[in-house]
Image: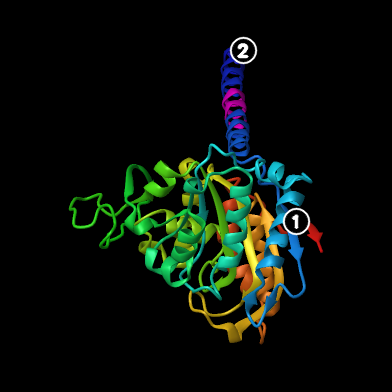
C-alpha cells in the first residue's frame, strides 16, 4: 500500500513538473517571438542637440536637416546617409510618416522635421509617391501645413479618419464604446457593437513601414503625447472610449501598438524635442514651453517616451512631485509586451553635438 501511494505521488509530481516545464517553455517562446517582432527595441536613444536650431520658436531648416542626418547615421551605425536610411526602409517600401498635427505647427510635430526626413528618404531612393504623411484628421494636417508640403514634395497626405477602416484588423476590448460618425461600426446595432477598434487602412493596406515623429508635448492622462499614445490614437477608430481614464489608456495604448499589423511596421521613432511643451496637451501654449534644440532617435518608442516624461517633469514650474510615477503604468505595460524599455536606468543614451 505504501509503495502504491508513493507511486501515485511520484506520478503526480512528474505531471506537475512536466506542466511547469511546459509553461516555462511557452513563456520563453512567447518572449522570443516578441523580441523577434521588434529586435531593435533595446532602449538605445540617440540625442542630437544643435544650439540655434530654433529661433523665436521657428525651426531652422538647414540645421534641422543636419540634425536628422546625424541622428539617423548614428543610430544605424553607418557613415553614408543612404546606407543609414536603408537600415530602416528600402526603396520598395511604402513609408507612412506619422506626425501629430492637432496642436499646430509650433506645438505639434514641426513640419521642418518631417520635411527633412522626407527629403532624405527620397534621396535614399524611396519614390516620393511611396511616402504618405498621415495623422488622424486631414483638417489638422492642412492647418499645420502638411498638405502644402506634400504638394511641394510630391508625396501623399491622408487622415486615417477618412481613409477607411480594415474590418479584418482590429483591437478587441470588453470596454464597450459608442462608435461615432466616421467609425467603422457607426449606426450599426448588436450586442458586440463598440467593443472593437478597427485599424486604419492607411496602416494595414497602404504602408509597409512607419516612421513615427512625435512632439515632446504633455498629455494629462498618458503623460506625453508621444510615440505610443500618438500612434495608437491615430491608427484605430472607436478610441474615444479610452480617452477619459488613465487606467484605460494604460491598458489599451500598449495593446494597440503591439498589434502585429501596427507595431511590426514601425521602423523608426523620432521625438521632436526642438521645443518641450510641458502643459497644454493638444493646445499650443508656447508660454508653457522650453526650447531644447534636440531631436531624439530610437527604434524603441517606450524609451523615448519615458525620457520625455522625465524631461517634462524637469521643465515644469512649479514642479509636481510624483507626476511621472503616476503616468508610468502605460509604459510599464508596454515594456511587459516587449515593445521597449521602461526603466530609465536601462536606457542607453548616445549624445551627438
Residue 335, visible in the rendered structure: no
- Position of residue 56 measured from the top left corner of the image (x, y, whole percent): 65, 83
Q: Circle 2 is placed at which residue position?
A: 3
Tell us which disc is closer to us: 2 or 1. 1
Please identify the dominant SS of the magenta region: helix
- Position of residue 27 measured from the top left corner of the image (x, y, whole percent): 60, 34
Q: Is residue 224 above or below residue 82?
A: below
Q: Which mark is residue 22?
A: none
Contact (CB < 8 A) between labels 2 and 1? no
- Position of residue 155 measured from the top left corner of the image (x, y, whole percent): 48, 53
Q: How is the image coloured?
A: rainbow
Q: Nearer the viewer, residue 43 or 176?
A: 43
Q: Nearer the viewer, residue 246 or 226?
A: 226
Residue at screen point 43% across, 72% down: 143
Is 22 magenta? The answer is yes
Figure quadrant of the C terminus: bottom right
Residue 94, visible in the rendered structure: yes
- Residue numbers of the magenta segment: 16-24
Q: CA distance from mark 2 to mark 1?
A: 73 Å
Left or right: 125 as drawn, with respect to 185? right
Q: Residues within 10 Å of mark 2 (few under 14, many from 20)?
A: few
Q: Nearer the viewer, residue 214 or 129?
A: 129
N-terminal label among 2 and 1: 2
Q: Residues within 10 Å of mark 1 (few under 14, many from 20)?
A: many
- Position of residue 328 measured from the top left corner of the image (x, y, whole percent): 60, 63
For the residue labelled by badge 2, is the local secondary structure a helix, a strand or a loop?
helix
Figure quadrant of the N terminus: top right
Residue at screen point 17% across, 53% down: 189
Q: For residue 6, which quarter of the picture? A: top right
Residue at screen point 46% across, 65% down: 148
Q: Circle 1 is placed at which residue position?
A: 70
Amino acid at each position: 500500500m505504501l509503495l502504491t501511494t508513493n507511486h501515485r505521488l511520484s506520478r503526480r509530481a512528474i505531471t506537475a513538473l512536466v506542466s511547469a516545464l511546459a509553461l516555462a517553455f511557452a513563456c520563453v517562446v512567447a518572449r522570443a517571438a516578441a523580441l523577434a517582432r521588434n529586435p531593435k527595441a533595446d532602449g538605445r536613444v540617440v540625442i542630437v542637440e544643435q544650439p540655434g536650431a530654433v529661433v523665436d520658436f521657428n525651426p531652422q531648416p538647414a540645421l534641422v536637416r543636419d540634425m536628422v542626418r546625424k541622428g539617423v547615421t548614428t543610430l544605424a551605425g553607418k557613415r553614408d546617409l543612404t546606407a543609414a536610411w536603408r537600415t530602416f526602409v528600402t526603396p520598395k517600401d511604402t513609408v507612412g510618416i506619422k506626425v501629430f498635427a492637432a496642436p499646430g505647427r509650433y506645438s505639434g510635430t514641426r513640419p521642418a522635421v518631417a520635411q527633412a526626413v522626407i527629403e532624405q528618404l527620397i534621396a535614399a531612393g524611396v519614390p516620393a509617391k511611396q511616402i504618405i504623411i498621415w495623422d488622424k484628421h486631414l483638417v489638422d494636417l492642412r492647418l499645420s501645413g502638411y498638405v502644402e508640403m506634400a504638394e511641394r514634395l510630391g508625396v501623399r497626405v491622408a487622415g486615417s479618419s477618412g481613409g477607411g477602416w480594415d474590418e479584418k484588423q482590429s483591437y478587441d476590448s470588453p470596454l464597450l464604446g459608442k462608435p461615432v460618425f466616421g467609425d467603422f461600426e457607426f449606426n450599426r446595432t448588436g450586442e458586440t457593437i463598440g467593443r472593437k477598434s478597427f485599424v486604419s487602412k492607411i496602416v494595414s493596406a497602404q504602408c509597409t513601414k512607419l516612421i513615427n515623429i512625435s512632439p515632446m508635448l504633455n498629455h494629462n492622462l498618458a503623460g506625453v503625447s508621444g510615440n505610443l499614445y500618438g500612434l495608437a490614437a491615430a491608427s484605430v477608430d472607436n478610441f474615444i472610449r479610452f480617452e477619459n481614464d488613465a487606467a484605460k489608456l494604460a491598458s489599451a495604448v500598449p495593446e494597440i501598438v503591439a498589434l502585429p499589423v501596427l507595431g511590426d511596421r514601425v521602423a523608426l521613432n523620432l521625438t521632436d524635442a526642438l521645443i518641450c511643451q510641458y502643459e497644454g496637451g493638444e493646445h499650443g501654449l508656447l508660454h508653457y514651453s522650453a526650447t531644447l534644440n534636440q531631436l531624439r532617435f530610437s527604434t524603441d518608442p517606450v524609451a523615448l517616451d519615458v525620457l520625455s516624461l522625465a524631461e517634462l517633469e524637469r521643465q515644469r514650474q512649479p514642479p509636481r512631485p510624483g507626476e511621472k510615477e503616476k503616468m508610468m503604468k502605460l509604459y510599464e505595460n508596454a515594456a511587459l509586451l516587449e515593445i521597449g524599455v521602461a526603466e530609465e536606468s536601462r536606457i542607453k543614451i548616445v549624445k551627438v553635438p
